[in-house]
Each structure stands twice: as C-alpha cells, then as structure tokens.
Amino acid sequence: MTAPTAPRAASGDSAAAGAWTRRGPVDLPGPEGDNSIAREPLWYAYGAGVDAPEAPAWTWVPQPPPDTHVPPPPPRGGGPREPLPLGTHDRLTALPYPARPGPLGSADRPAAERYASRPNPAPRPDGRPHPLPAPSPAGRGAAEPVADRLGRALVTAFGPQRREPENPYNDHRPYASPRCLFPVHAFVDGGAGMPWRLLEPDRHALTGAPAAPARNVVLTGRYTSVPPAYQWFRGSLIAIELGFVLRALSLGLELFDVPARLRLPGRDAHRLLPALGLDDAWAWSLPFVVELDGGGVPAHAGHAPPEPPAQEGHAPPEPPDHLPRTDPALAALIRVNREQTYGGAAAPLTTAVPADLAPSAIAPDWAELLWRRHSGRMPRALHGMSGRRRTVPAEALDSAARWLSVPPPGPELAAAFEALKVTAVVQGVSGRTDGVHLLRDGAAHLLRADPAAPRRLEERYGYGLSPVNGCGIHDAPLTVFLSVRTRELFERLGTAGWGAVQHAAGWAAHGLCLSAAASGLFARPVRAFKEIPTQRVLGLDPDEMIVLSVVVGVPQDTGGALLDLRL
C-alpha cells in the first residue's frame, strides 16, 4: 500500500495532456491514468452510477512526499494506566498451530489452558515438547477472569512483535500496516458511565481504571495519520486496515475464548466518536463495535460520559471550516465515510481460521506464526521487498486458498466478501501450472497458462528494482489480486458496499498473510500496480477494480537483527 510515484499532470486539461482516448469506464489523462490511487475516487463515482467520471480538481495538486509527513501524536488518556496481563506469548506458544478452542471440559476455560491440558497434544514439527503456560491465579486448569482473557486477546491482536533496526519503519505488530503507521486504534469501555479506555500497545496498557467489566471494544481509524500524498485513498487505507484489525482481533478473541459480536456503524454511530474523548473526532472513521460476552449493549448507552439520547440524523462531528480549502481530498473522503452505515443487528464473530489446516513445519504454534508474519525485508534501511526464486510445495497455495475462503462476520461484510474475485499469478508451485488461477471456495482453478505473467506484473509495478528499492514480484510464487465490479456492488449493497468490500478485502488479506507465515513465506499487501495494464495481465474486465493485492514471496535473509518485543 504505497503512494503514487508518477508525476502529476500540470492541469486537468485533457488537451494539454495530448490526444487521449478513454481505455475503460475509469481512466484519467496522462501518467495518472494508470495510478490506482488517483483512480480511487473515480471508481466510487462509477459505482454510484456515473458512467464516465472525471477526476476531481484536487487530483492535480502537487503533494509533499510521504516520508515528509509527521503523523499526529497518538491519543493519550489522562490518569492512571492498567497494565495488560503478562505471559500471553507463553500461552500462545503452548497452543499448537492450527489448533483452535473446542469442547474439552469446562466451556469457559481459556484455549491455551485447554490445549496444554490435552493428554496427547499434536507434536511440534521440530520434535520439542509444547511448553505449559503460566498457571492462572486460581491455579492450573482454572479459567482466567474474562478481563484477563480479553487483555490477552488484545495483546494477541495488537501487541508489538519486534523491532527491526534495519527497517525504515518500526515497530511491527501481528498484522500489516502501511509504513507501520497503525492508524486504527482500539478503545475499551470503562463500565458504569466511566470514560472509554484507550488501548496503548506500545505501553502494554489500557488507560484509566474500569468501574465494571468491559462489554465493548471500539475500532476506529484516524485519517490524518496517513500522509496527504495518498489523497482520497487515505479513506480506503483506513477501511482496509479495519478489515485487517477485525480479523486479528477475532483471532485473539477466538484463541482465548471470549465470545463476541460485531456491530457495524449505524446511522447514529457518529455520536460515539466524541464520547471516546477524541479532540479531533471529525478525523476518525465511523466506529466498529465489538460486543463482548455475546451480550453487549448499545455502545452509546451507559459506557460514555452523559450525552443526549440518540436521535436519528443527529449531525456528526464537523471538520474545521478550512478543510475543504486546505485538504479537499480529506474533506471528500470523510463525507463518503459518513455514508458507510448499515441497518443490521450485531452478528456473532464465528471463526477467523479455516478448518482442516495441516500442521506447519515452520510455525508449530500460534506465537511462532504471528512472529513469522512479515512483508519482505530489505537490508540497510532500503525500501521494498527482497525475495528469491524457489519451488514451494503445493500446500502453500492450497493453504492460501483455504484462508481466503473464510468470510468475515455479518451478512453485509459476507455479501461484500462474496462479491470479491480472487485472482492469483502462480509460478514454481509443485504440481501446479505457472499462470493465472482463480481462487474460489478454498481451491485454485487454472484460468490460463502464462509462465511470463510474473515478469509482466513486475514491469507494471510502481516501485521497480532500483539502487534504493527492492522488488520481489518477478520471483514471487504467488501474487494475489482482490477485485470487484463496483457498479454491481453498489446495486446490491448501496454506497455502503464501498466500505464493506474494503473491510472484506482487508479481512481476506490478513488471512493470506497468516497463511504465508505458516508456509515460511512473506506476504506484502500493496496497491502500487498500474491498474489497467495489470487488468490485462490477469484477464480482468475494464470495469473490475483491483481493491488490494498481496505479493507472497520466498524471504531472503538480510542478516539484520530482530528485537523481540513480545510480553
């Protein structure tokens, strides 16, 4: 997920850009025509019914390089902080991958304790025994309090994994985030009218002190954390990362037996943002609410400072008056976000993990799996990704297809997930033909043999090999593309389909990242492919938007240090 590299046109005048013929329903004159980030608002307009959308005027306004952007400081709650429980890494180490909670004695026992107490746990591929987790305060076999299990689930989802001194971006968490910005934050309610508590992963703590057990976790993203060079695409980055975070949190809750439901933003969801204690509430996305213990309560009732009763159509937090002038792209994407509302009830979190996965020779337990997830490393603080050509077993592709078949929770996100087409360029996978494959229903289906497809893809990538940038696409055994027909999507789900399909793409991509880690591969989510030439390599139609792509490659050891931050 990277910013455009092509120079911006001097103006929006088509004549100034020379003779121009529209190549599809979404196109721009000049070098921006193949820039997926500049094309983003046009895809939204096309989905909403505009047959030949024109680029907004701000498309042509020069922007500072992304590396010059200084994100706002993270929100900090005042008062005391409560440390999250220690030893989560040990408990995840005691849980063999891909084992998940299942019936064994008391239904409320944490997963790590259940699996540690199995008579014959699955052997680790390296032959070492599974370590036992530290006993809970009540003694071996007793269930931890739900507050501690929630804390461990939060650490599993958000806790820093490592620092890489050679990497220009740090620290690294269990899920991918552009430039390690992590613009999506989590808030936990304080109970009994107490203020919401901010999760601070870098401090391994929650702000404030609870008055009652938590019933809700809120997820929301801050648009101003992302460099302005990404223009309107900042909204898409937040929506995609919400999908990553939702699957990461779902996995943590699943592994520590914390049942929950997901409530997507309703028409009054904007009222929750000021209640979170955010000074710049206008700059945050509409919140997801994860209701705990299968019950939950409306997030605005009794879990925030007093406020007026909910009123349909109540005005959301308004951006500053100068924003349409100083950052019109940001003002436009916030307007679109406020339209991404749903009317359905909260839906149970089912599972983040596919069934019938084989054990991994690389990651014997869940702690090792999360540690091994990375996006392709480069030496000496260089950018991009490095890889090497190697034949990989068929299980790497089969596992990826299964992880990509697990839908997100709730009918709205599941419908958007179903609308996604998953196309993969495959090479060097044992027993599989090099070429373009369709991944559907947990399996790969050959569409077209094409041994040259990886080379052609690399030629169409916005960040090619250079003295300061690595590019491992030519050698990658698997490059996956998630695409959708936005016109059909809007006809089915309305304008809320725009956010829903990006959440679904993030959910799917995080699963692919975990699958790659289990296979000893890296997985790098990107949006830097030149869209129209890439459509032609894949055989996509001109009205199919590439929502997200993931390069899955064989890592190359850089020799750099990996500093373990797990607690």
Image (tube, rainbow, N blue to C red):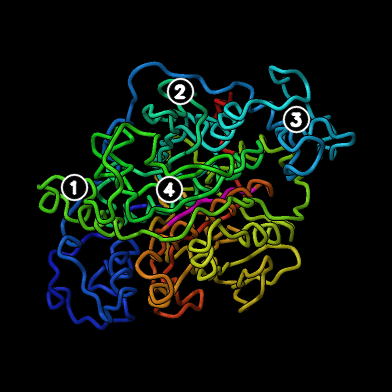
How far separated are the C-alphas under marks 2 and 1? 31 Å
Distance between the alpha carbons at the discs numbered 2 and 3:
28 Å
Residue range in magenta is: 521-526
Residue in view at x 50 percent, y 53 percent: 346
- Indicate the amino acid at tag 2: Ala
Residue at the location (64% across, 57% down)? 403
Circle 3: residue type: Glu
In the figure, residue 460 lies in which quadrant? bottom left
How packed mark 1 is, by other alpha carbons closer than 10 Å (few <14, some 14-19, many 20 or more), is few
Q: Position of residue 488 (x, y in %)?
A: 42, 77
How would you classify the magenta stretch by its main secondary structure?
strand
Query: In which image quadrant can residue 194 be found?
Result: top left
Is residue 525 one of those drawn in magenta?
yes
* Residue annotated with mark 2: 211
Reading the image, the residue beneath label 3 is 113
For the C terminus, give its image quadrant: top right
The residue carrying pointer 4 sits among few (fewer than 14), some (14 to 19) or many (20 or more) residues within 10 Å by Cα, namely: many
- Mark 4 lies on residue: 288
Is residue 4 visible from the viewing direction of this image?
A: no
Residue holding disc 1: 318
Q: Secondary structure at mark 1?
A: loop
Report the side of 448 relative to 127 (left or right).
left
Mark 3 secondary-structure assignment: helix
Question: Hey, what amino acid is under mark 4?
Answer: Phe
Q: Who comes first in sequence, dot 3 or dot 1? A: 3
